[in-house]
Amino acid sequence: MRLVFLGPPGAGKGTQAKALCEGWRIPHIATGDMLRSAKVSGKLPPSLAQQMNAGGLVPDSVVIDLIRDRIAEPDAARGFLFDGFPRTVPQAEALDDLLQTAGFALDAAVAIEVPEHLLIERATLRRIDKKTGQIYHLKYKPAPPGADLECRPDDAEEVVRQRLKTYVAMTSELLPYYQKRGILKRVSGEGGVDEVTARIRAVLGSRSKEDGKELAG
Ligand code: AP5
């Protein structure tokens, strides 16, 4: 499986990607996580960290360099799931070029769609365990007692609204890009986590099941 997950902030891309990648045993590659790690380790220039905190995108070249290196790692040889990448048409074109050079192609681009009021609720009430990195939600997935939780700086409501605007502007070109290539799969992200996982498996069809069987054996 070579997949990309598209969707607005709080749509559940990370939640779904984790659940599915465990079964498929392919790496879940999230550019947001990679950029946050680079921010913590001081490898991301402060101006770009500020852009992230304000709900904007970092430049295409920065993300494409990260992906070029990551895709060359051995665990990506049998497949991968990109979460939050690509976000622009130049990023999508760069990914196509990288894959073509390696003799591969994307199987599907899954767009997870959720109404705006739910996105705001999911993002602003998300909390992360500082020690384990586990993602919780104050309403839908409460953390166990004693967990040391933090909130992402870009999950403040006004920043989430800005991220949503950025997403809408970006997808006006990105979704048609994958639609034209016949690999766009739209999935409703409303409802419980397991319900959404089942929908994603269904749109991926036999390919998803074949990989499951192969791994179970
Ligand atoms: P990134 O980390 O990718 O953020 P995002 O796309 O805005 O997505 P989120 O992580 O907010 O949401 P998610 O869809 O993964 O939801 P989750 O599963 O956590 O990017 C952050 C920033 O990095 C960007 O703004 C940009 O600056 C930069 N960046 C990253 N990639 C870039 C790129 N390619 N180019 C340029 N810049 C880039 O779920 C959210 C919450 O809801 C959780 O609490 C979860 O428990 C809960 N939840 C999930 N599903 C359900 C459900 N079905 N029911 C109830 N609750 C649910």
Image: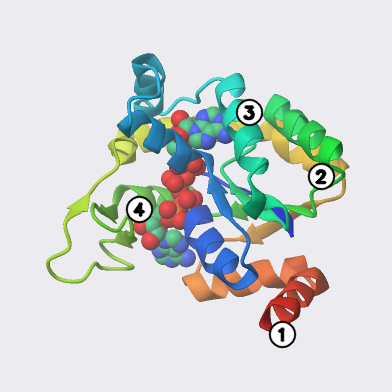
Q: Is residue 144 above or below residue 124?
A: below
Label of residue 180 in the image:
none
Q: Is residue 115 left or right of residue 134?
A: right
- Which amino acid lies under the numbered mark 3 shown in the image of this protein? Ile
Mark 1, residue position:
217
- Quadrant in the picture for the N terminus: bottom right
Marks counted in the figure total 4
Please tell me whether mark 2 or mark 4 is closer to you in this view. Answer: 2
Label of residue 121 in the image:
4
Whether residue 4 is visible, yes or no, is: no
Q: Is residue 81 left or right of residue 43?
A: right
- The image shows residue 52 at horizontal and vertical percentages of 40, 27
Label of residue 179 in the image:
2
- Which amino acid lies under the numbered mark 4 shown in the image of this protein? Glu
Q: Do the residues labelled 1 and 4 touch (CB within 8 Å)?
A: no
Please tell me whether mark 2 or mark 3 is closer to you in this view. Answer: 3
Q: In this view, does 15 lie above or below 152?
A: below
Question: Which residue is found at the position 51% from the left and 62% from the top?
Answer: 18
Q: Which of 8 and 99 is in front in this view?
A: 99
Label 3 – label 1 distance at C-alpha: 35 Å
Kindly state the secondary structure of the residue where label 4 is placed. helix
